[in-house]
Amino acid sequence: MIVNTNILSLNAQRSLYSTQNTMQKSLEKLSSGYRINKAADDAAGLAITEKMTGQINGLNKAISNASSAISLVQTAEGALSESHSILQRMRELAVQSASDTNTASDRVKLQAEVDQLAGELTRITNTTEFNTQNLLAGGLSDTFHVGANAGQSVSLSIGAMDAFSLGVSTSRAQLGLYGAGATTLAAGSIEASSLGRGLSAQTYKIVVNNTAASTAEIADGITGGVSITAGTYNGDRNENLMIKVDAVAAGDVTAASYSLDGGTTWTGATVAANAFAYKGATFTFGNNAGNAVGQTAQYTLTAANDSIQLQDAAGTNIGAAVTVYNDMSSVTVGDAASSRTMKINSASLGSLTDGTATQVVTMLSSSAATFNTDKTILAQAVTVAGADISTQAAANTAITTINNALESVSAQRSTLGAMQNRLEHTINNLQAASENLTASRSTIKDVDMAQEMSSFTKSQILSQAGVAMLAQANQVPQAVLKLLG
């Protein structure tokens, strides 16, 4: 019998440690619900389940992506539904205007509604957005990621749906350069742009009839008087000019000044050869020894009152001639009643020379929208007016034009509907894949609670038995005490 080494106790301790270690693992699994809580539990199983987890998370996010894509498609399709209604109304108006039971004034009112409807079509394209991305102005070309892995995506593009792109606007006529043979108005001498809808893509004539400037003497206190001897006054209308003699020599005026406020303030004028220039005209003092310092003369100056007439290529007047003055920066000519007008901008309208200039008009109708890199609008599409229904012939043509626009919108809505159906099927497929993959992962990672509970109960019983046997093993060496007694 030995005392120093209790082999029985050591054996009991080893068995008890193993049992408690097994019980601890069972407790960890039962409390977490997972069979694999760390790599040591099942190294290969951990690698497999983590790969599956990545797939499952990707599938679930792809479902979310597809749902968002459906929302985008529904937003665009909803806006196009209203565009369809607008085009149907435009078609009704065109059919109405195509009948000669309407008078010219009736058609002006019908045209006004078409213009507003065309503007609303373009406004819808400019403002229909999803997450700040414009959907209908022509800049959308999106890729929707609808899978767990790289490259698993679908694409969608939506064309421009504004009035110009659909062909139902004739909104703006931009003038080009003056045509060859325009000898009295140099190219670029005025800048012209049309505000009206009714100008067609043809050449127009701008006819200028020039009238010289005039002066009216109110009071002349200068001996010998003052007169305009050269040049044409190019100043403003009805300008009051007061002239004062400041210095004379041998009867000639050598220095003078002028005032525009009735003599309150004066501005020195450069006098040479008994004359000075003011706004294009030369004013000459009468050479008379009676001229004296302080003498004044007052004039009312009237700028040239030219007239500008707009004509078609055949020389037929469009509207009445319009009087223009040099201080006017712009004037609109043409026939406002029929919207056939042209706005002419110039720094000096009244200085134009008599004659005719031929102008080429190019139809631009609307400008297309431009986009930033994030598909937000940089510059909106523009529509000033709608398809021309101002005459019976134009209205008849507009019916076909609007029909084509309706077909374009229908085709785009059909594409959007097909995409929505596709995405709904995609979601169904993704949900099934996620469900099955989750079930497969569960068989590897999740713990079988009944089985593990049985194992835990076994370990619990063995642990209690091991503690009891360890106590018994520790009592064995005490038998030596009997020998010592």
Image: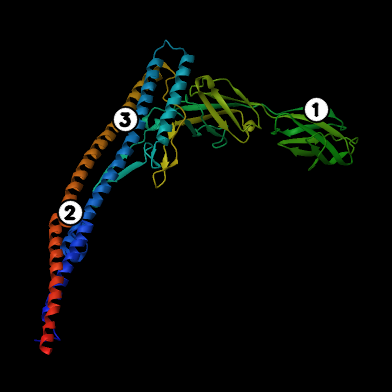
Q: Residue furthest front?
A: 485
Residue at image coords 40%, 20%: 394
Q: Earlier in the sequence, mark 1 or mark 2?
A: 1
Q: Position of residue 436 (x, y in %)?
A: 16, 48
Query: Do we see residue 250 in this rendering?
Result: yes
**Left or right of residue 66: residue 223:** right
Query: Do we see residue 156 in this rendering?
Result: no
Residue denoted by label 1: 217
For mark 2, does the 10 Å Cα neighbourhood hold few (<14), some (14 to 19), or many (20 or more) residues?
some
Label 3, label 2: how far apart the Cα atoms are:
49 Å
Res 257 quadrant in image: top right
Q: Earlier in the sequence, mark 3 or mark 2?
A: 3
Residue denoted by label 3: 408
Badge 1 marks a residue whose secondary structure is strand
User: Between tags 3 and 2, which lies in front?
Assistant: 2
**Left or right of residue 448: residue 383:** right
Q: Position of residue 349 (x, y in %)?
A: 62, 32
Res 483 quadrant in image: bottom left
Residue denoted by label 2: 441
For mark 3, does the 10 Å Cα neighbourhood hold few (<14), some (14 to 19), or many (20 or more) residues?
some
**Left or right of residue 469: residue 406:** right
Q: Amino acid at mark 2?
A: Arg
Q: Amino acid at mark 1?
A: Glu
Q: Amino acid at mark 3?
A: Ser
